[in-house]
Image: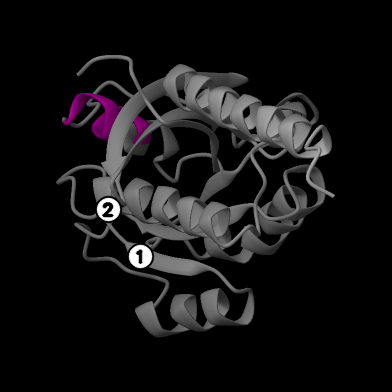
Amino acid sequence: MSEHYDFLFKFLIIGSAGVGKSCILHHFIENKFKSDSSHTIGVEFGSKIVQVRGKRAKLQIWDTAGQERFRSVTRSYYRGAAGALLVYDITSRDSFNALTDWLTDARTLASPNIVIILVGNKKDLEDREVTFMEASKFAQENDLIFLEGSALTGEHIEDTFLQCASSILSKIESSELDPDKMGSGIQYGAESASSRGTSIQRRNNTSRSDTNCPCS
């Protein structure tokens, strides 16, 4: 796929250590499970262009470390994020209980209109500690989109990123998000920026013509 795109979105993947954030990113980028995964130190990065709502969006995705000792470092990457995957492990009650702290960080440090998807990972495992209903309730109470999936099988992994990107585009179309605003986490692609510049120039030329019109 070529590098031409309409928008660039900054994404985060956040959550406690061991919930499978790196595996989610790897499966999305490479379309396969990362069998030799280890805890992320600091941050990892990946990018991919997707087709959504008739637009091509390049997702720049920052996978942040979940260990407490890296929190001061990873918080700096929250600034200007347009979307985030908030991940917990459905077999770990502790990872679910920690969601409130991760959500607070995201909404405090990132873009005010950040789109956040709650992701229950490891759906392929049977020893569940967090029910679908209680996670769904948490999502409703905190105005989050919610999906369960599996980085091992790939179930709902791509859907998660696409839903987040689609919600961001919807907010752009409704003017709730402004790509021109600093810290929005959104940039126009080269072609989109060029066409917008031409459009603005045409409007400016029209305005000058109207100002100089002798018909008064």
Residue shown at 18%/53% (left/top)? 155
Read off the residue under disc 1: 147
What's the amino acid at mark 2?
A: Asp
Secondary structure beneath dot 2 equals: helix
- Stretch in magenta: 25-31
- Up/down of 38 relative to 176, above or below: above
Q: Is residue 99 left or right of residue 9?
A: right
Residue shown at 47%/75% (left/top)? 135
Rate crowding at label 1 as few (under 14), some (14 to 19) or many (20 or more) other CA atoms within 10 Å.
many
- 181 vs 202, nearest the viewer: 202
- Up/down of 23 relative to 176, above or below: above
Q: Mark 1 or mark 2: which comes first in sequence? A: 1
- 199 vs 78, nearest the viewer: 199
- Up/down of 138 relative to 41, above or below: below
Read off the residue under disc 2: 159
In the rendered structure, does residue 28 fall within the stretch colored magenta?
yes
